[in-house]
Image (cartoon, coloured by chain):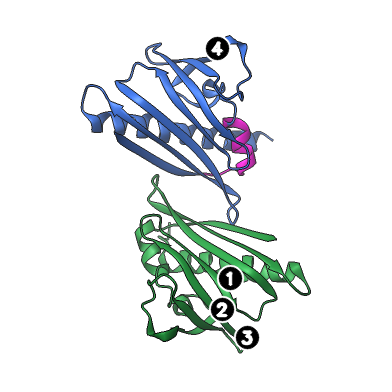
């Protein structure tokens, strides 16, 4: 098993961040790498066990991920990969958002545990850590900062 | 039960912040609210169960706190109050540091739970949240933070 952990400061209040990311079907609204998303079977996006079916922008690659847990008080959710173009197996990831009271900002954490099925393990870990997790944090920060200015 | 939650960004790597705060006996060395400290019975300050005995600066009285848990893996320690001038009971607090991988910084989270036994609850909360925990994070960032 390999573990990837990334964390960042998002310069918006935690309730604002959580409202955006809590929606398991909202990846295309904030993650630059994702083009489309739908929840299979028309289930609500906060129903545990629901599956999001989404595509990568760069190559149309299909991913299916299942929601395993969602906590509004801990602002945490966990999901597993069912289908992915990435060479991974047994992939379980979590996101957690914690208020930073003294700066009115958010501490965002994203981590995953998985096996790599082909390919150099570290290259895959770096790809997920930087191009998925860190790119996602930067996009949330930019998106919400833009909204603040627009108000 | 009253809960206090204070968190802050410290613009320094987590190992640096941890080496400043890990010693259960050195709070007065860096926190201006406190003075003089010793570990009772000459125990090492990282021995779980040890008691620190220190003063609130300016004659504010003596506090005794017991170390309940210390984790170098999680950059975290938990302790309870045994004796304090504050009107609190069942006081348990925890400080945890988290690495911020983007930018190599630290997020500190300091929490406490307790019962206020007498008088002004808001005043007690302020003494804990702002004057102790919040002040600590300001000082740590002033001391250790990269000036950017």
Please determine if labels 1 and 3 lie on a single subunit: yes
Circles 2, 1 touching at the beta carbon (< 8 Å)? yes
- Image quadrant in which you'd find residue B128: bottom right
For mark 3, what is the residue? B60
- In the picture provided, is A74 more to the left or to the right than B105? right
Give the main secondary structure of the magenta stretch.
helix
Q: For the residue carrying disc 4, how many other residues have a C-alpha within 10 Å: few (<14), some (14-19), or many (20+)?
A: some
Q: CA distance from mark 3 to mark 2?
A: 9 Å
Look at mark 2 in the image and give the residue it sits on: B33
Q: Residue B37 location in percent, x, y?
A: 47, 83
Where is mark 4, residue-wise?
A: A40
Q: Which mark is residue B28?
A: none
Reading the image, the residue beneath label 1 is B132
Q: Which residues are magenta?
A: A10-21
From the viewer's side, name the closer residue of B4 and B106: B4
Query: On screen, B58 above or below B24?
Result: below
- Quadrant, the C terminus of chain B: bottom left
* Secondary-structure class at tag 4: helix
- The first of marks 2 and 1 along the sequence is 2
């Amino acid at each position: 098993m390999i573990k990837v952990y990334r964390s960042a400061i998002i310069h918006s209040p935690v309730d604002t961040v959580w409202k955006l990311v809590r929606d398991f079907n909202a990846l295309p609204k904030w993650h630059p790498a994702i083009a489309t998303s739908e929840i299979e079977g028309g289930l609500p996006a906060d129903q545990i066990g629901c599956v999001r079916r989404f595509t990568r922008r760069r190559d149309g690659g299909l991913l299916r991920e299942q929601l395993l847990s969602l906590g509004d008080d801990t602002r945490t959710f966990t999901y597993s990969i069912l289908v992915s173009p990435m060479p991974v197996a047994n992939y379980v990831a979590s996101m957690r958002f914690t208020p930073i009271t003294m700066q009115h900002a958010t501490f965002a954490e994203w981590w995953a545990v998985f096996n790599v099925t082909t390919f150099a393990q570290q290259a895959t870990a770096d790809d997920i850590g930087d191009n998925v997790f860190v790119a996602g944090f930067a996009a949330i920060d930019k998106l919400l900062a833009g909204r603040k200015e627009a108000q | 039960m009253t809960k206090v939650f204070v968190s802050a960004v410290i613009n320094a790597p987590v190992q640096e912040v941890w080496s400043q705060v890990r010693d259960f006996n050195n709070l007065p060395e860096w926190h201006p609210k406190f003075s003089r400290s010793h570990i009772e019975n000459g125990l090492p300050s990282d021995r779980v169960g040890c008691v620190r005995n220190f003063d609130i600066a300016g004659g504010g009285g003596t506090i005794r706190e017991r170390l309940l848990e210390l984790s170098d893996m999680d950059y975290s320690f938990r302790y309870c109050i045994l004796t304090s001038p504050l009107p609190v009971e069942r006081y348990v607090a925890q400080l945890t540091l988290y690495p911020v991988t983007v930018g190599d910084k630290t997020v500190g989270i300091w929490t406490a739970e307790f019962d206020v036994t007498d008088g002004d609850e808001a005043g007690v909360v302020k003494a804990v949240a702002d004057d102790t925990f919040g002040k600590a994070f300001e000082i740590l960032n002033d001391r250790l933070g990269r000036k950017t």
